Amino acid sequence: MRTFYPFPVANIETFKLQLVEISNQVNHFCYLDSNNYPNYPYSTFGSLFAIDAVDVISVSKNCLEQFDTFQQQHQDWLFGFLNYDLKNEIEPNLESTKIDNIQNPILHFFVPKYLVKIENEKVEVGIVSESENVPIAIGSESALDEFRKLITFKKSLTTHDSRLTTKISNRISKEDYISTIEKIKNHIQLGDIYEINFCQEFYAESAEINPVAVFQKLNEISKAPFTSFFKNEANYLMCASPERFLKRQNNTLISQPIKGTRKRIQDKKQDNLLKQQLFFDEKERSENVMIVDLVRNDFSKIAIKNSVDVEELFGIYSFEQVHQMISTITCNIEQNLLFSEIIKAVFPMGSMTGAPKIAAMELIEQYEPTKRGLFSGAVGYITPKGNFDFNVVIRSILYNSTNNYISIQAGSAITIDCDAEKEYEECLLKAKAMLEALR
């Protein structure tokens, strides 16, 4: 169905910039980049670009059932996202009634017309060949010619101004945030939950930005291993995520939740000290192990008996802005298990909800003033063989270019021992790179 052709280029980084610019000419676009992050467990690709769409599924009801049909029709590469509110389909007693100014669908995937893979300085372009299963048949030579024209449409790269001139506001004041944390801690005291990820929104209205320029600046600042730039018609995601939600590698599932954060500083000695403090911090370890147990429990619903394994507990990984505590959990599954069945068992990710998961999601709906939407969801790809890799949509800017609304959300894990002031500061730390990309 899809044939890959070598595509020599003179400069890889310039070529990437050219490809991102193509998003201005198409309605559907996805760019995933590992930023060549060293030694990240289970890293398997450099950069992937999905450009233009042969077919699209964009739905908000009966999403997983409709996706199963779509996937059966297209035994090809699929790129897309799962909105956080897919939880309401997985757990019918849940709901989402808060405001949502970004207005993404719950599930959105597309079959790319062009698929560009970049790995170890090698570039390949995947072209759809004639097939009865594909609505639009493309001859390989003519399609490659079309692709070349798409790249060379602009003679030179345009330098865009990424600055945002409108004000960024807090959806919840610091005083209200602290008051809400105290209410949540009361729920913990009563035994309703053990831990919850509580998030707040920073937003801008009547905002006009150049998403490509903002994304490029965000990527320069963060260089995250699960970076993504996604365009769905008028909606954009600019994401510098350090976290993997879920990967399937044949009959193995891998999840790598993040819980535990320290800021980075320029002084190397002090920076290493902060790293060590994170590793030995009992509060951070407690938060991390709660989510590890939650993932183990989710995996046990679909795993082959006795195959759930914690491969790494409390791993410390350093990124441009922060140090993070990351654990790696794996399990084995039956080969014929559908993507939808896996998602029903494990979505949404425990690191963005809390424990117990359903009770935490109910309290999130009660106390957070806005819908999360694509934030706390997942973006990624699925291969023709059914393997996949999805990030956690955090450290992100969401932009609706129709109503000119920008949304940035950030959160932290709330436990009985947490300090509300410090949790507020952690949210600001996590939002720092996105706010900087807009300045």
Image (tube, helix red, strand yellow):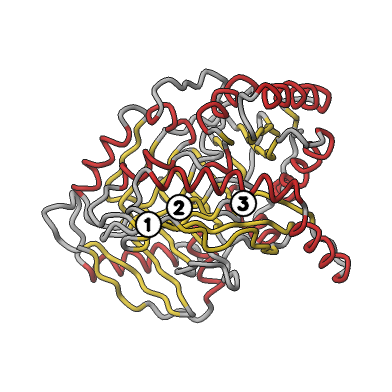
Secondary structure at numbered mark 3: strand
Q: Amino acid at mark 3?
A: Ile
First-in-chain label (2 vs 3): 2
Eye-nearest disc, 3 or 1 = 3
Horizontal side of residue 74 vs 410, given as left or right? left
Which residue is painted at 37% across and 60% down in the image?
A: 252
State whether residue 101 appears in this view. Answer: no
Say which quarter of the image contains residue 98: top right
| Label 1 CA crowd tier, 10 Å (few <14, some 14–19, many 20+) | many
Give me the residue at 40% from left, 62% from top.
Answer: 150
Residue 57 lies, in percent from the top left, at: 31, 40
- Front disc: 1 or 2: 2
Cα distance, mark 2 to mark 3?
12 Å
**Local crowd size for mark 3, using a 10 Å CA cut-off: few (<14), some (14–19), many (≥20):** many
Please provide percent x and percent y for residue 123: 41, 75
Mark 3 or mark 1: which comes first in sequence?
A: 3
Q: Quadrant of the N terminus?
A: bottom left
- Return the residue nearer the eye: 399 or 386: 386
Taking the spot 80% from the left edge, 60% from the top edge, the residue there is: 264
Residue bearing mark 2: 246
Splitting the image into 4 quarters, where does residue 141 fall?
A: bottom left
Residue contact between numbered discs 1 and 2, judged by CB atoms under 8 Å: yes
| Label 2 neighbour load within 10 Å: few <14, some 14-19, many 20+ | many
Q: Which mark is residue 258?
A: 3
The answer to whether mark 2 and mark 3 are in CB contact below 8 A is no
49 up-or-down from 299: above or below? below
The relative height of residue 79 versus residue 361 in the rendered view (above or below) is below
Q: Which residue is mark 1?
A: 388
Query: Under tag 2, what secondary structure?
Result: strand
